[in-house]
Image (cartoon, rainbow, N blue to C red):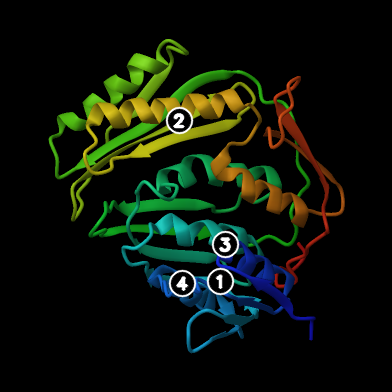
Amino acid sequence: MSKLVKLEGHNYLRQRLILATLSGRPVRIDKIRSDDQDPEYEATFLRLLEKVTNGSTIEISYTGTSILYKPGTIQGGRIDLDCGTERSISYYLEPMIALAPFSKKPFVLTLRGITTDHIDNSVDIIRTVLLPQLKRFGIDGNVELKINKRGAPPLGGGEIVFSCCSVRQLKPIQYTDEGRIKRIRGIAYCTRVSPQTANRMIEAARSLLNRYIPDMFTKEPRVESMSPGFALNLVAESTTGALLSGEKAAEPGMTAEDVGLLGAKILLREISKGGCIDTSSQWLNLLLMVLCSEDMSKILSFKIKVDEESKTTLMTCVGIGYVNHNKKTT
């Protein structure tokens, strides 16, 4: 049995458990929220992790401040989960995207809950920015995210279906040309508020973005939700296919114009950082680089330390050659 890894604190809980699952090493995490906080969403994520694996054991201490996780194999298959309303669906979906390519069976994951909030990335950003980047690593077979229903806080009611086939091994990536921004696309949606809210968000965003680039188009899907809400998701595409995102969901007291302007400013801030990947997808790209075959991978990221000359950082990595032994060689 692999040596037990001991960690402390609740920070990066999802990432720690995902890395333990991929490496097959048991992990013990102590001092998790020792200030008597006991969020239900962390327990929900543990239930999801138990569903997508086979043979995993999870032991939680009586006080709820310690977890012992012994990972099993990544099983995949058809999985259904009600995510509740504490965190959005993306909180649970993002880690599953890292596990799905290495499962035994193709992933068909159905999640229900909140699709857009002001804490986590929205499912729209995952669909339009995160998933297309998987193709560069050779994950291009039946990768799809279907949004059946949208759900705004606090009641939720949204539903998505994530599908992904497994691969035997990832391909190394060489992506260092960020190009120049050529167009901006987006989605403005509103539910249980005036239909003009979406138009007001778009016009506010246009008033700022049209000074930068005139090629901007935003869709206004008709949606139904159990709670009122509105949000704006924007994606800038470069001449080399780089996708940079910015989004804003309404918070209490905010107007449509506030959401539109803030969403546009967040996108422009992301563009100004430079690089071929944005903040929302940086973690997944770096993880997949590590798991690639034993060859050099390079990707141009935004600055991590101040570099007055280039403003960007070239992330270089030799993959560990991670192999999905459940996937037969073709």
- Disc 4 from disc 3: Cα separation: 14 Å
Q: Which residue is mark 3?
A: 11
Name the one closer to the observer, 71 or 171: 71
Mark 3–mark 2 CB contact (< 8 Å)? no
Q: Nearer the viewer, mark 4 or mark 3?
A: 4
In the picture as drawn, the residue positioned furthest to the bottom comes out as 62
Tell me which amino acid carries mark 1: Gly
Query: Is residue 264 placed above or below 89 in the rendered structure?
Result: above
Tell me which amino acid carries mark 2: Ile
Q: Quick one: label 3 or label 2, which is nearer the N terminus?
A: 3
Q: Residues within 10 Å of mark 3 (few under 14, many from 20)?
A: few
Q: Quick one: label 1 or label 2, which is nearer the N terminus?
A: 1
| Residue 45 picture location, percent across and down | 47, 70
Q: What SS does tag 4 mark?
A: loop
- Disc 3 from disc 2: Cα separation: 25 Å
Name the one closer to the observer, 70 or 177: 70
Q: Which mark is residue 266?
A: 2
- Disc 3 from disc 1: Cα separation: 26 Å
Q: Which mark is residue 76?
A: 1
Q: Nearer the viewer, mark 4 or mark 2?
A: 4
Q: What SS does tag 1 mark?
A: loop
Q: Residues within 10 Å of mark 4 (few under 14, many from 20)?
A: few
Mark 1–mark 2 CB contact (< 8 Å)? no
Name the residue located 61 percent from the left edge and 30 percent from the top edge. Answer: 242
Tell me which amino acid carries mark 4: Asp
Q: Quadrant of residue 71?
A: bottom right
Q: Quick one: label 3 or label 1, which is nearer the N terminus?
A: 3
Query: Is residue 4 placed above or below 310 in the rendered structure?
Result: below
Q: Quick one: label 1 or label 4, which is nearer the N terminus?
A: 4
Q: Which residue is mark 4?
A: 35
| Residue 311 picture location, percent across and down | 70, 25
